[in-house]
Amino acid sequence: MKTQRTQYTGNPYICYEPLYMKTVAFSEFNKNPDKFLNALNKHKKSFILSRPEGKVVLLDFNEYNALQETLYLTSTFANQRRLEDSLAEMKGNL
């Protein structure tokens, strides 16, 4: 999967945003859900599921937890500052 380096507005942490994420029609997913779910778990390939009601993103549980942890760790300025200080200290010890 190709990625592009981008930065969130107001957040000093670099993220990697996919340039291409496969979109799958709900009818195609419904024909063989195991195929898509196995790809999620085995290859960590998330995808967009397109439904008449709207689009949803399906991703591996561990990937979801990692996103939630990142959101929590960067949710306040104090947490962001602690992370920055720790990274700076770590880089200084290298």
Image (spheres, rainbow, N blue to C red):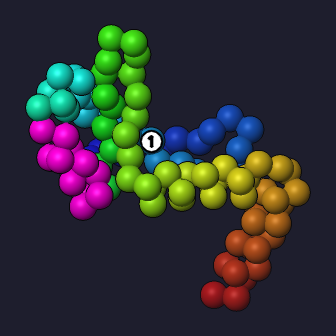
Q: Is residue 12 above or below residue 50?
A: below
Q: Position of residue 32 (x, y in %)?
A: 12, 38
Q: Residue at x 59, y 42 (%)?
A: 7
Instruction: Report the side of 41 relative to 91 (left or right).
Output: left
In the picture as drawn, the residue positioned furthest to the bottom comes out as 93
Q: Position of residue 50 (x, y in %)?
A: 30, 21
Q: Residue at x 33, y 31 (%)?
A: 48
Question: Which residue is tagged 1?
Answer: 17
Q: Nearer the viewer, residue 67 or 20?
A: 67
Q: How many marks?
A: 1
Quarter of the image containing the C terminus?
Answer: bottom right
Image position, residue 61 (x, y; %): 43, 55
Does the magenta portion include 69? no
Secondary element type, mark 1: strand
Query: Magenta segment, principal secondary structure?
Result: helix
Q: Nearer the viewer, residue 61 or 83?
A: 61
Q: Is 32 situated left or right of 71 in this image?
A: left
Whether 42 is among the magenta residues is: yes
Amino acid residing under circle 1 = Glu
Q: Quadrant of residue 87?
A: bottom right
Q: Is residue 24 visible?
A: yes
Q: Residue furthest left?
A: 31
- Is 1 placed left or right of 55 in the picture? left
10 Å crowding of disc 1: few (<14), some (14-19), many (20+): few
Q: Which residues are magenta?
A: 32-43
Compared to 52, does 33 lie above or below?
below
